[in-house]
Image: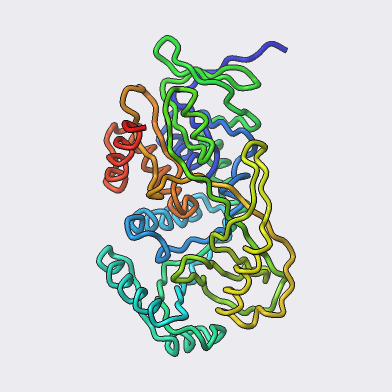
Amino acid sequence: MPAQRASARTVVVGAGTVGAFVAYGLARRGEEVLLLERKEPGLEAAGLNAGTLAVQNKLLSLIPLAMRGVELWQDFERQTRRDLHTVRCGGFRVAHTTVGGERLEREAEQQRRLGLEVEHLSGEEARARAPYLAGTVRAANWCPLDGHNNALTAVKQVVQEAEALGARVQSRSEVLSIEREAGRWRLVTPGGSVGADRMVLAAGLWSRTLAERIGLRLQLEVHNNQMIVTERLPRLIDHVITHVTGRLTLKQKGEGTVLIGGGWPGHHDLEHNLKWPALPSLIGNARLATATVPSLEDVHVLRTWAGLDGRTRSQHPLIGPVAGRRGLYLATSFRAAYTLGPAVGEGIAEWIVTGEPPELLAPFAEETRRLVASA
């Protein structure tokens, strides 16, 4: 069968959280868009995370994007009537030491200045609301905006909704090469070539390889985060739990399983896209979880897994148009992409249509220009 040629006004490369929301945002605005994914939508980092939609555990510089991201996840579910299993249960960010408690108090004050509703509590006050917390918890911050949804299906449903609005989606379409041809971008995939006026790189860690093919160097660090899921339990944890060290996320899903994460590193073979959990990290993660919620001590673990993502050193997004590369936009490679992704994706869609950067994205666009220019 001869290779097929396709054309689109905008091609989005990568169907993770960001790419899905770029495609959805463009399709909602009546724009012609083609979404390319080398595997299946939501299969890599987007589907391998814990689905935590916490805000208060983000970098201070990312709090506004996190607030908007959580809002957009909820808007999507309400407007489309799709069930993402979203739970807005509120969350406790805990500390086991006096120093950690003091840090929580400072951060709560800073976050409130950004408009986030946060309450600083003593350990006793936190246990009055969440009796399952350990007696060793010295302090906690409470944020009613924290919640979670089902990462296994949420991004897939965003892509499906984009398709319903007219977006075209090609799975199993790895981009083999990228060139400029007659003033347009030409992307070659195993199924043929794609021509587009605009191209959005939203492929996370793999944006680095794609950028190299057009002479751009993106300085990304590889992060390998692993997860633990327990057996089904009676209702125990009614909130999202995070830790002041950033080494714990914990919540109980509707069916009773408990998801435990927190950025503990696993093993990986980047060349072959392999990733697997590391036993010392599993032990460390489990110890912190049981030190926070002692009732988990005798619970059975059913499954563990690891997932890869790429981030800039600042952990801020690479975002916006690239100088000297007409029609090229970056929307990739930052911390907490699952929570922030809807805000970044929607913002890029707005930027493409209006030609103006949304206020929330403008500071990161300036940083991106500096980074790409110096690469």
Q: Is residue 45 above or below residue 145?
A: above
In-front residue for pair 205/49: 205
Residue 156 horizontal/vertical position (percent): 59, 45
Residues 89 and 164: in front is 89
User: In the image as oriented, which residue stretches furthest toward the front?
Assistant: 280
Q: Residue at x 51, y 66 (%)?
A: 247
Pick the front one: 102 or 48: 102
- In what quadrant of the picture does the C terminus appear? top left
Q: Residue 65 placed where, x, y %?
A: 36, 53
Q: How many marks?
A: 0
The image quadrant where one finds the N terminus is top right
Work out whether residue 122 can be spotted: yes
**Residue 25 visible to an observer of this rendering:** no
The foreground one among 26 and 30 is 26
- Placement of 260 over or under 337, stated as above or below: below
What's the colour scheme? Answer: rainbow
Residue in view at x 43 percent, y 23 percent: 215
x, y percent for residue 174: 61, 28
Q: Is residue 259 rendered to the left or right of residue 373?
A: right
On the image, the x and y values in percent for residue 253 come to 62, 67
Position of 65 with respect to 175 (left or right) is left
Q: Determine whether, in the image, residue 106 is placed left or right of residue 328.
A: left
The quadrant in which residue 279 appears is bottom right
Give residue 62's quadrant in the image: bottom left
Q: Quadrant of residue 238?
A: bottom right
